[in-house]
Every structure is written in structure tokens, then in C-alpha cells.
Image (cartoon, rainbow, N blue to C red):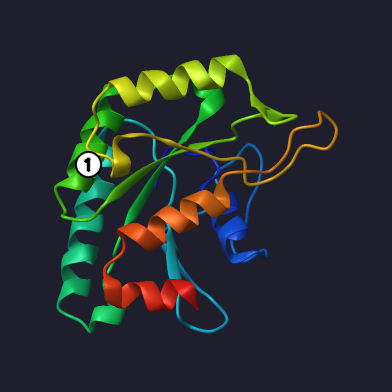
Amino acid sequence: LGKTGVGKSTLINAIFGESVARTGIGQPVTAGSNLYVSRTGNLGLYDTRGFELGASSAQILGELRDLVQSKRTADASEHIHVAYYCVRAGDHRLEPAEVDFIRGLHDLGIPVFLVLTQVHQLNGAYRPEHMQFAQYLYEQGLPIYLGRPFLTAALPDAALGYTAHGVPELVDATFQAAPEAARMALAA
């Protein structure tokens, strides 16, 4: 979940290790909620349309609440076990409506991961302004898993020398946060 253009679909592709979700530059690409399932059928990730602040975030949260509740009545393998809320590091801000959305996600009773996307890393060092933003997010005391954002760059930028990083750490933490029954699917 997250605003338009923060890299939600790109993150999904990085987690699966292949291009399953359409990505783009400029105009929004994901029109609704799409479920992507691993080749083994053991892991599914929803990619939601991006939203801007205002009524659409309340609508998306309502739709998500309905989806989570409907899946809770299904087999445990159909449950939604965690939520990723993505924020682009270069935006350097988290809007009050986004904070409210994160709190709403938390109220659904699932762990919420705050994923900072497009965090530039060069020779093992993060851009200082991205680290400052991550520190700011940590200090907000948001109801997020481990109380901190996860710093990621799903794709490298060879032209600028930035490396891809953080996705394996995010997947490992997701494994730890997921219920034991779901860990087998994630491990597979």
C-alpha cells in the first residue's frame, strides 16, 4: 500500500525475483488491487492502486478492511498476514493522512511494515538525507513492526552507482512476523 509512484509494484517484483507486476514512470499503472501468487502457489502479494491523500485513502482502507475480514473466514492459507506501507525516501515527508492510514492498518490486527523505498546506497553508505528521514520516521512512534522503517532499494541504479538492497531483510522480517502456519509458505 502507499501513494502513487512509491514503488509498490517494483517491490513486489523484487520479492518474487521476476517481473510479475507492471511498473511505469509518470502515470499510475496499477488500477485496482491485484493478487500475485508465486509459481509454487505458496505466497501471494496484493498490489493496490496508489492513492493520493483525501477520500481515496479512506476508501482504500475500507476496502482493505473488508478484504482482510473476508479472508479471515477462509482457510488460514487465504488470510492476509502482514501489510507493507511504502513511502519513497526522496519525498522526505509523511503526511498526517498517511499516519492515520498506518494506524488504521494497525487496527486491522496485522503487523504493519513501513517500507522506505528508493533509498540510495553507495559503497555501503546511505544518502544522509534518507537516513535523516528514516530517523524522523522512527521517532514518530508509529504502530509499525519493530518500530522502525525498513530501508530498501528494489532496483539498482547502475548509472549513479546505487545498489539494490534491503529486500532480503524485509522478507526475513516478514517471515518472523507472520504466524507460524504462514512461515512455511513464505519459506517455500
Residue 36 horizontal side relative to residue 26, left or right: left
For residue 115, side relative to residue 104 (left or right): right
Residue at horizontal 46 percent and vertical 19 percent from the top: 133
Residue topped by disc 1: 58
Q: Is residue 108 above or below residue 26?
A: below
Q: Is residue 188 left or right of residue 109?
A: right
Q: Residue 150: percent from the left, percent from the top? A: 45, 39
Where's residue 169, x and y in %? 51, 50
Measured from the top left, where is residue 105 in percent x and y?
23, 47
x 16%, y 66%: residue: 69
Residue closer to the observer: 2 or 83: 83
What secondary structure is found at the residue carrying circle 1?
helix
Q: Is 120 on the left or on the right of 30, as rendered?
A: right
Total of numbered circles in the picture? 1
Question: Does residue 129 appear in this view?
Answer: yes
The amino acid pointed to by label 1 is Ala
Above-or-below relation of 164 to 19: above
Q: Residue at point 29% right, 64% down?
A: 81
Query: 10 Å neighbourhood of mark 1: few (<14), some, or many (≥20)?
Result: some
x and y, in percent, of residue 46 in the image: 42, 62
